Amino acid sequence: MLATVTPSPPPAPIAQRQRAIGEVLLAVENISLRFGGVRALSNVSFDIRKGEIRAIIGPNGAGKSSMLNVINGFYHPQEGRILWKGRARSRMRPHEAAKGGIARTFQNIALFKGMTTLDNIMTGRILKMRASFIEQALYVGRGRSEELRERDFVERIIDFLEIAHIRHTPVGKLPYGLQKRVELARALAMEPELLLLDEPMAGMNLEEKEDMCRFILDVNEEFGTTVALIEHDMSVVMDISDRVVVLDYGKLLADGTPDQVRDDPAVIAAYLGVAHG
């Protein structure tokens, strides 16, 4: 369960932070994904270790979001396999991946714009509820006890992400940066072991990016949540990531520490030397 956490100071550089990196949590083995004649991924292999922050970078169209879609079961590759906790995963769907401990945010915000912040985050607890539809509708028995318990859990997430002031605000009325934070909150409500973040800082100003970096690091350190994120801001990638995997035209270009990737001539040529919007 989430503990109450007081606001943290700005994150220290990654080298100054104590990391608790464990065994391989998820392994991607020789994944190939095609859409008709278009090859989105080609023989890609890498792993994500328990407790780390793993960045996935590359030029636009490199296959980064496709890879996250494969990991959470939205896409099914024609070749290769995914190993989750050492076991080959069956052809599962996103809700099955969610039950298994994998949560996801999206490049384009996927919230219920007419619902409040609180109600949006509560949807992340649905998989944890066991009451029948009648019990929930009539607010009796397990329906009442579960509602109170799950709402208490969600309130702790709201406090952790410092969004109590927008608890009852419809998310469609919130600025973009706060909507991104609400989407992160909904993913955290699922209590994931692996959190997949698709460009969590896209479109944010510098202050919003600093806040999001702090929250991602705190989630990783306080709760031990493993994080895999796609991000174009290389200063963010270099500051918070333990390891970086680089994709280019659907192929694995490099894999290593931030320093190793930053100094790789192939990466410089394919990505770091190219301007991206």
Image (cartoon, rainbow, N blue to C red):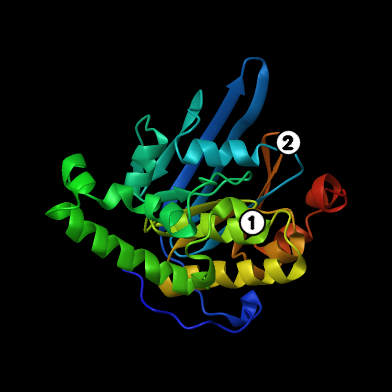
Left or right: 247 in relation to 169 = right
Q: Earlier in the sequence, mark 2 or mark 1?
A: 2
- In the picture as drawn, the residue positioned furthest to the front comes out as 138
Q: Is residue 259 left or right of residue 26?
A: right
Q: Amino acid at mark 2?
A: Gly
Mark 2 nearby-residue class (10 Å; few <14, some 14–19, many ≥20): few
Which numbered marker is on residue 182? none
Vertical side of 39 occupied by 145: above or below: below
Label of residue 244 in the image: 1
Residue at the outermost left position: 141
Who is closer to the viewer here, 56 or 119?
119
Residue at 63% from the left image edge and 78% from the top image edge: 15
Residue 219 coordinates in the image, percent (x, y): 48, 68
- Measuring from the top left, give residue 42's x and y in whole percent: 62, 30
**Gap in angstroms between the C-alphas marked 2 and 1:** 17 Å
Q: Nearer the viewer, mark 2 or mark 1?
A: 2
- Front-most of 4 and 135? 135
Q: In the orientation shown, which residue stands out farthest toward the top?
A: 36
Label 2 with label 1: CB-CB less than 8 Å: no
Residue 262, percent from left and from top: 77, 60
Q: Which residue is mark 2?
A: 61
**SS for dot 1:** strand
Which residue corresponds to the image point at 57% horizontal and 57% vertical from the top-left? 54
Circle 1 crowding by C-alpha within 10 Å: few under 14, some 14–19, many from 20: many
Residue placed at 25% from the left, 64% from the top? 149
Q: Is residue 20 visible?
A: no
Which image quarter holds the N terminus? bottom left
Image position of 72 with respect to 2: above or below: above
Secondary element under disc 2, as helix, strand or loop, is: loop
